[in-house]
Amino acid sequence: MRLERRAHVPLYLVIVAPVVAVTVALILAAGLIAAAGVNPLTAYAEMVQGAFGSRLSMTETLTRATPLILTGLAAAIAFRARLWNIGGEGQFFMGALVTAWVGHSLGLPPVPGIAVLLVIGMAAGAVLLAGPAYLRLRFGVDEVVTTLLLNFIVILFVGLMVEGPLRDPMAFGWPSSVPVDSDFRLPDLIARTRLHIGFLIAIAAAGGVWLILARTVFGTETRAVGLSPSAASFAGISLPKNLMAVALFSGGMAGLAGSMEVLGVTAVVTTTMSPGFGYAGIVVAMLAALHPAGVVAAAVFVATVFVGADAMSRATGVPSFIADVIVALCLLTMLVALLFTTYRVQR
Amino acid sequence: MSPVLELDGITKRFGALTANDQVSLTLGQGEILALLGENGAGKTTLMNILFGHYAADAGTVRVFGQELPSGRPRAAIDAGVGMVHQHFTLAGNLTVLDNIMLGSESLLRTTSSRKSARKKLLQIAERFGLPVSPDAKVSRLSVGERQRVEILKALYRDARILILDEPTAVLARPEAQRLFETLKEMTKEGLSLIFISHKLHEVMAASDRVSVLRGGRLVAERKTADTSAEELAELMVGRKVERPVRKDHKIGAPVLVAKSVRVEAEGEVKLDDLSFTVAAGEILGIVGVSGNGQASLGALLSGLAIPTAGTLTLEGQDVRRLGPRGVIRAGVGRIPEDRHSEGVVGELAVWENAVLERLRTPAFSTRGFVRQAASKAYAAGLIDQFDIRGAAPDTRTRLLAGGNMQKLILGRCLSISPKLLLANQPTRGLDEGAIAAVHSALLAARGAGAAIVLISEELEEAVALSDRIQAMVKGRLSHPIPASAADPQRLGLMMAGVWTEGEHAT
Amino acid sequence: MIEALDLLGNTSLWAAVLRIATPLIFGVLGALLCERAGVLNLGIEGIMTMGAMTGWLTVYMGGDLWTGLVVAALSGALMGLLHAMLTVPLGLSQHVSGLGVTLFASALAYYLYRLIVEVGDLPPTIEPFRPLDVPFLSDIPVLGPVLFQQTMPTYLALMSVAVMAYVLARTPLGLAIRMTGENPHAVDAQGLNPTAIRIGAVVAGSALMAIGGAFLTTAAFNSFFPEMVQGRGWICIALVVFASWRPGKALIGALLFAFFDAFQLRLQTVIEGVPYQLFLMAPYVMSILALVLVARRAEVPEALMTPFRRGER
């Protein structure tokens, strides 16, 4: 039994792969649900109901998907260039922190104010990833560990700020920052729900990333670098410059996610505002096979799982951690599924 | 006397490709058999089957009369078969003794008997005249020394049959000579040998018998004494070999002038006080065994390496710090040494690879966006003009056969009417048809007035195409000699560094 | 300042260093074994979490502490097998597979814990390993309390360092593992099976990692709660580079790191006015610095992260 490279990958396989991967993951997770004494089909029905059963739940799902689209884009961009950015979580928080910091005292009219805040959120995320990128270029330090460790450092830093200089004296319960000016809150997309225009901005970002990767010089060069660094170098592409540009781009997307979450949903930054958006973004990117268009669909799917699992947990008593299990399984099954799109099994 | 080795009806397919088709051959006791064939003829596959790296789809292997279970190197080693691989299977970070001992003791043992292993190794080294120091780190050894370790690995496991895959690919003439003497001594000690080669003169000089493979089939067997290089060449290729011939013509003004260039990499001096000149309409051949600085010379002329001393000018313009894109803009076409890892990005489309190195020029991009239509049209033009088969602009480049990929690379170089063309091992791994096409293209460029630097390990190619030849040894160049004065003897000496004292080109 | 230096003379600090170092030692040795064979195992954070949970759960459900460690090791081995199958025979991205295993093993651990254990206001506890009191030796001033009043798993960790160093350097198996990480084709050419060796190394290494996690719940603390591994797994990955892939240096790295962690904890009580988060950040910052210092000189196993495919170069 051998694996043989396919000459070309038929389109149907590219679309079928994530569907198969998700199905297998759901089947495997069903075993765990059964162990909780609950009928898996009932549980999954509750999940779908919980995610799409009402107007409110649908908007919740899409609200949840918004940051996932952006962290998914961040991972996809980076992974394509073989930059292992596992620091999406930290970059998210950096964007959120800077936005919350500046957002409560920025003296600008709403529209330019929002734009400025989103941009500095992006910049914060970009600068954060630039650090590990620089360490890789200059010292040859692997970015996997540095970006991971930075996540912990950043979250501690956010805690420090939120309990110190940024503290909202009027908040009870968990420490949080002073809320941003209400002028800068992103308008709702659908009234009386949490769904805000950030969702549209995220989709636009996905479109923008697709355009950049497919049609621009930078995008083509980035794809070349990711596929064959030696050939890209021979063709005159500067690997260090490209790596840094990719790092700024990727970090910026994750920073934007944090910024939008503050302006659109929470209005404050806290240490608990991310249920792992950064890490989930990696799963989203893989399910999308690193394709910007696929990222939107994959983000909605992952959001569905999380929102649905919360409702399902309340209804059936299955621990809500099942959502994390399903999402993690999806990553692994998708990895295997991708193998079969690239290779054919031969006797 | 019965043969020590019998291959009977060996067939091996990889997908649609039949690498070996019903191949049978035998090896007698104390014999040296040469396995000859072009690139892609199936020689290495056959030997990999013998050694157990692959399992054959059909056919049997008998060693000393016993059938060998297929697909297990362990079985082959235990039966007395040893292999000296073309790309050495050694771990650079470990010592000679470590590399040789691996696999000789059971993994369940709680301790390693290094003392007795060392003794056995030194005995074998002495017996076969292959001196080594057991505690040397392999990464510090020269290529020739590493090959000795590779051979000793097999002898340590008591090999009675030794397979050598292109053993002289990385050796200079005198070292190759020494190797073949060693091999002859080994047969006197009772070993039987097979060596794979595509070099006719070696096969003629060192073997007792020759088996010729072509397109996966065994097409001829001869006693070496009864045949000739010409006959073998024809058998290898299947038709009268016809490579294009260079005709003398008027050489123009100097185009590229290098003076006392020094290039360093990884803390070592790779090019040392290097000087040469190439004129318009001239092909300068740089010959030498790989590892003597050719890669750095290629990098220098490609714009990838900046010299730490010396000057390099193209029609008077200083080109040292231009980088690849600058160098291309100045009129240099570059054919890289390894088309797969440097020449193209396999997963990108043909049109993308056609324009990648010139993407940031107005012809192929505007305001940061790629001009797709113009680029695809350009690629279509190349495909047409250079007869690139199996390709459309949107085809994924890795699907192209070696020869066609090389034509794509050549095409994009020549379409800018280059003043200077760097051809670094341009026909490596290509079959005869593709080789002829590449040679034609190079000679045509020469005729159009391009100055060409040809770096080649194939002496035959260098002599056939070049107007002048220089040898590269340890980062230095010998004085150039005209092609008419280049006989194998002289070239061999040049490549071994035998120049009169102080005779390196300055 | 004086108070800070005073801390250094306190034997409880040094005893704490060994205790804090123990899970790190298991983790580094495990990661080192995988990488020496050529496989990067980023599943370590999840595997340590899984080991912490299963070890604790075994004891909670009535088993003895040593059985707990064994069950933890087996759960780690299973997760390691998953990672090995994806990355070795299938040759999938070691980065992505490792991350997936971390996410999966952690999620699974939390899920099973929540499913099986009733959690009230406070997480339930078990009886952990008690520190030994070696007769005579523990009465030696200074060294006594530090070296001879540790828990059994700590001694196990120290022994593991010696065993790993010996196996890698002096046995045929160790040579085969090292060679697989340098050039698997060389292993294949000598009649051994590099795929099997890699899988075995990853499984064994993952078992060690899991024991390190179990130490957290059966010796250091006595209950299990989410996020308890706190990035120790990632720090171990950094420490492997710092240790140049050698068990002896790995021990030194783990001790050094544990020292900073223990010191930082006590420093908080002595230095006023500095937010505690800055102290907590210190270990992570130190790890990054350590990596920067060592990176250029690192003697990486040459075939680390390169899948082995017969016939491909």
Image (tube, coloured by chain):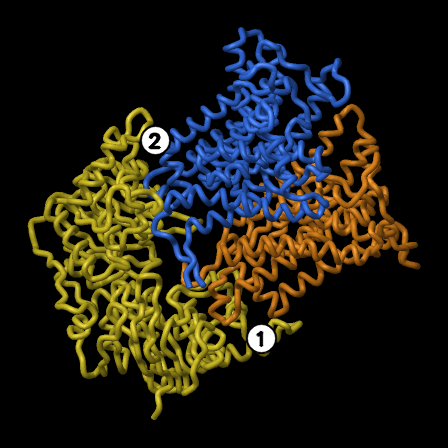
Chain colours: A blue, B yellow, C orange
Assign a secondary structure to mark 2: helix
Contact (Cβ within 8 Å) of mark 1 with mark 2:
no
Q: Chain for mark 1?
A: B
Assign a secondary structure to mark 1: loop
Q: Chain for mark 2?
A: A
**Horizontal and vertical percent for residue B334?**
26, 45
**Horizontal and vertical percent for residue C47?**
67, 49
Q: Is residue B413 visible?
A: yes
Front-most of A225 and A77? A77
Give me the C-alpha separation between circle 1 and circle 2. Answer: 58 Å
Callout 1 amino acid: Glu
Which residue is the site of mark 2?
Answer: A215
**Horizontal and vertical percent for residue A151?**
62, 34
Q: Where, quadrant-wise, is the N terminus of chain B in this rendering?
A: bottom left
Q: Quadrant of residue B53?
A: bottom left
Q: Is residue A219 left or right of residue B421?
A: right
Which residue is the site of mark 1?
Answer: B105
Q: Quadrant of residue C197?
A: bottom right
Instruction: Name which residue lies at 11% across and 59% down.
Output: B245
| Mark whose residue sits in front, 1 or 2 | 2
How many discs mark residues in the rendered view? Answer: 2
